[in-house]
Image (cartoon, rainbow, N blue to C red):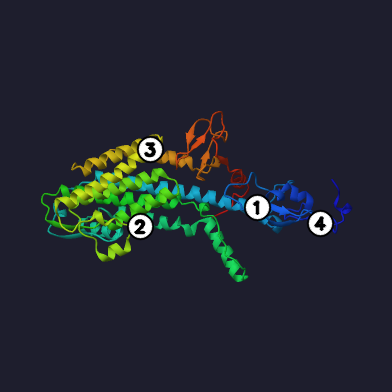
Amino acid sequence: MNEYRDIDVDETPCIFPGCGHFYTVESMDGQMDMGEHYVLDDGGMPISIKTASKPFSMDEVKACSECRGSLRNVSRYGRIVRRAMLDETTKKFISWSTGRHLELAEGLLTEQQILEENDTTDVTRNVGRPGRLNLTGPAYGQIKNMKRWVGHKRYDKLVQIYITISKYKDEVSVEEQPFHKVCDFVRHANRSHKTQGAFVYDEDMIQRRGHLLAISLLLKCNVALLSDFMSLWKGAAMTRTEISVDFSANFAQCEELIKLAAETSRPQLQVEGHTYYAQFCGLALALGTPRQPSTDTRDAFPEADAATATTTPDGDDREALKNKGLQHLEQAKALLENANWGPKQQLMEAEMEAVAHMLNGGVFYNRVTADELRAVYAAMAAEFSGTGHWYTCEQGHPFTVGECGMPMEQARCPECGSPVGGQNHSPAEGVRRAEDIEALAMGVGGMRI
């Protein structure tokens, strides 16, 4: 290795990172694998980008070979280093959004238990009073109407949880994704410098799991409130209330969950969407024959199926609604046929059986215990803990593995069911370890989203 005084920097340029160590450009380019990322000329100078970088695609985080100091301030290697930094931000976003979802799901579960244990004597005495209750329009409007009608502060905490989940849904929206924010910065820079051409990036880089989980949690909270109200109303000594039901908005949200889950290869969330749809059909039948959606509601939620509402309270309309719910349950069962999702699948099947019982005229009761749900939530926390080694399955869904860092047995992606674990600590075909974000987690502990 030559000393600096022996180098002619005009002939052999040098790189001076912020850590204080320095290298020749030729040596540093070799360490950074510039040839893997750029097309180089005969002199080793980059002339164009070789391939577009992909999430979790780098084998290691490049740093100073002497002290592991950051190379972020070296513009020549900015694209290589910042690709890995973006992966780290995405990993942190996934871990945070999953943890926040589990926190909200646990809070919802706890409030449901409290609701079931509360004395309902005073509530049922008045809940069937004469008057008109509108369960129409947006879901939150329905919830507020139920809260006012029931009173006794019975739904105060659940409504607050619903509001918190709605805020969480905004926090994990596409606009808040690390890749989308970087895209916005690039587009702003292009406009400022009047760069020609449109900037386009791969939409698969966006992590949509948190957004879908938020929709699912909103639907779960909505079903919990409606189910409790239905139990109170059915248990009232007299029911003189005229209930107007229009669940177009609820059905539309179910359809949104089903559609987005299908587009992102998340069959578990598809099953949840179909099950929620069937539950709303059952609740509409139990609370009274639904009426034709208003023009405003149809315009606001065009994807809602108009066949789920009726114009007159006759048997044919009720039968159509029942059949619609059963159709969605059949679609959910079809997704479960070849699935192997362990305890979570068993809970899904139990939930679907209870909904089918309600659609066929029976009383809805929850066959899934709180302890069973908590066990599923604990497993989800482990799958996206951020403390193990990170991988992406063949569909591009990220997940973590602990222990030695390689899957020890046959396993499947927690989101889509793709094989992720091979034998003898070897991953299945198509599974890629995201080593770049792991190294960054150790070296950039102070980074915040």
Q: Which residue is mark 3?
A: 344
Q: Earlier in the sequence, mark 2 or mark 1?
A: 1
Is the residue 134 above or below the residue 195 in the image? above
Q: Earlier in the sequence, mark 3 or mark 1?
A: 1
Label 3, secondary structure: give it: helix
115 or 261: which is nearer to us? 261
Per the model, the C-alpha gap separating discs 1 and 4 is: 21 Å
Is the residue 430 above or below the residue 150 in the image? above
Quarter occupied by the C terminus: bottom right
- In this view of the protein, can residue 228 be seen by the observer? no
Q: Amino acid at mark 4?
A: Pro
Quarter occupied by the N terminus: top right
Q: Amino acid at mark 2?
A: Ile
Per the model, the C-alpha gap separating discs 3 and 1 is: 39 Å
Judge left or right: residue 36 versus residue 214. right
Q: Which mark is residue 154?
A: none
Judge left or right: residue 62 versus residue 211. right
Front position among marks 2 and 1: 1
- In this view of the protein, can residue 137 be seen by the observer? yes
Give the percent coordinates (x, y) of residue 127. Answer: 16, 54
Q: Earlier in the sequence, mark 1 or mark 4?
A: 4
Q: Earlier in the sequence, mark 3 or mark 4?
A: 4
Q: Amino acid at mark 1?
A: Val
Q: Which mark is residue 163?
A: 2
Per the model, the C-alpha gap separating discs 2 and 1 is: 39 Å
Q: Earlier in the sequence, mark 3 or mark 2?
A: 2
Q: Which mark is residue 81?
A: 1
